[in-house]
Amino acid sequence: MSQIDAAGAQRAAVPTAAPDTAPLVPDTHGLTVWAEIDLTALEANVRTLRALAPASDFMAVVKADAYGHGLLPVARAALRGGATWLGTAQFAEAFALRDAGLTARLLTWLSVPGSDFAGAVSRDIDLSASAPWVLDEIAAAAAEVGRTARVHLKVDTGLGRGGAYGADWGTLVARARHLEAEGTVEVVGIWTHFAHADSPEHPTVLAQQERFFEAVAEAEQAGIRPEVRHLANSAATLVHPSAHADLVRPGIAMYGLTPVPQVDDDFGLRPVMTLRARLALVKELPAGQGISYGHAYVPDVDTVVGLVPAGYADGIPRNATNVGPLLVEGRRTTIAGRVCMDQLVVDLGPGSRAQAGDVVTLFGGAPGEPTAQEWADATDTISYEIVTRLGARVPRLFIGDVPGTSSPDGPDGARRA
Ligand SMILES: *Cc1c(COP(=O)(O)O)cnc(C)c1O
């Protein structure tokens, strides 16, 4: 698990004598590639987003190892910033949060027949149901554990992915009412997800919202009394106040990246992840000497190249070949030649004074640094994928973690000096 790997790397990297008061800036000496995770920025982003939806509860979406940022430190920082709920896709992610001692309301939503519903119910985790078989498995688990399971019914309002679509919604609601009467299940939420929230003017946004409130009314008529109705991801939290409802579920915005890059506004969000590496080698190469596999880059003058010890095993997209932006020696440049499994090369130019050990920034948020969005634009994807795909072997170094909020016995105990 990346959590444990990261903790191990952190133990090696952080001097134990550092004071535990000021925000910790980790010592990166000797590390090849690492991600600095600014938890102070994350906390501030949660506050910024909360202020946009002040009347709604706030579910911090921490699926996929908190979009690659590190599940437990991010979840704790989000709660410090005012998040009232946590959300994960996979059960194992939710179990990890509970087993680390986090007690906030917690929803997990992706299950298959045979998923460990009993494990979820016994850990007081809310579950999502998109079909009657899910409700039946949840009810059986609840009976086994001897508790009432809390369920959020998911309606497909037009995403065409999870949720009950069309007339299936009525069937799902009826099944839930039956199980509520039996006492195994309590419906505490009704929810859905947008298809086009990132295109603020798209007509489906309002259509989905209307269908959602219709579905809520239908469930309420059948006797369901949901505590929370929720549909807003980051984009809707930022640009569709009418979708805030009882609870918002931001993911990407919490990490300081915008879901609407075409909108010229950073919404006051600060990027949380900065990916850096140290040059492993600097050397001169003559004009005409092709660089890296396939010689996809050939310098036309004698030049100096630097070897960056980060590759697609670390999550650097291979199609960043010749286009991925970097900051080195205070200057912007691009990757020279193919991205390999563990390494890539940068053309530092004939006059370079760079040395092995110099720090290279791949992306971050400080002035002059390339952003995850620029990487996404260069490689034809979205910023979500750039941060989430970061490899498990890249240590996450946490800045601004707060002493006393981590379990001293857990792997996170090592994240603070
Ligand atoms: C991932 C996810 C979110 C968060 O989406 P962002 O666009 O990152 O804000 C919210 N709800 C559900 C169901 C999700 O799967």
Image (cartoon, rainbow, N blue to C red):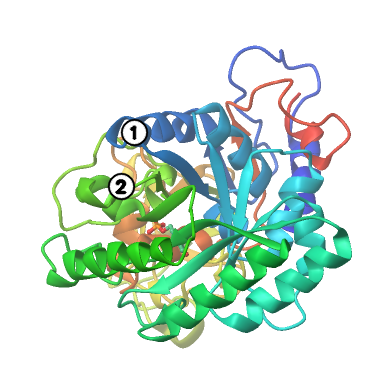
Give coordinates of residue 58: x percent, y percent. Answer: 45, 41
Ligand 1 image position (quadrant): bottom left
Q: Quadrant of the C terminus?
A: top right
Viewer-nearest residue: 367 or 257: 257
Whether label 2 touches label 1, CB < 8 Å: yes
Left or right: where 360 falls relative to 150: left
Residue on which disc 2 sits: 244
Percent of width and height locating residue 28: 65, 37
Q: Amino acid at mark 1?
A: Ala
Q: Is residue 387 above or below residue 24?
A: below
Reply above or below: 197 against 241.
below
Using the rendered view, name the quadrant where residue 413 is placed.
top right
Residue drawn at (38%, 43%) of the image:
256
Whichever of labels 2 and 1 marks the residue nearer the N terminus, that label is 1
Name the spot of residue 239 as percent of width and height, x first: 20, 49
Secondary structure at numbered mark 2:
loop
| Dot 2 alpha-carbon crowd within 10 angstroms: few under 14, some 14 to 19, many 20 or more | many
Residue 245: x percent and y percent? 33, 47
* Rendered residue at 81%/22% (across/down): 16
Residue to which mark 1 is pinned:
55
What amino acid is found at the position of numbered circle 2 in the picture?
His
Other residues around mark 1 within 10 Å, as few (<14) / some (14–19) / many (≥20): few
Can residue 190 be seen here? The reply is: yes
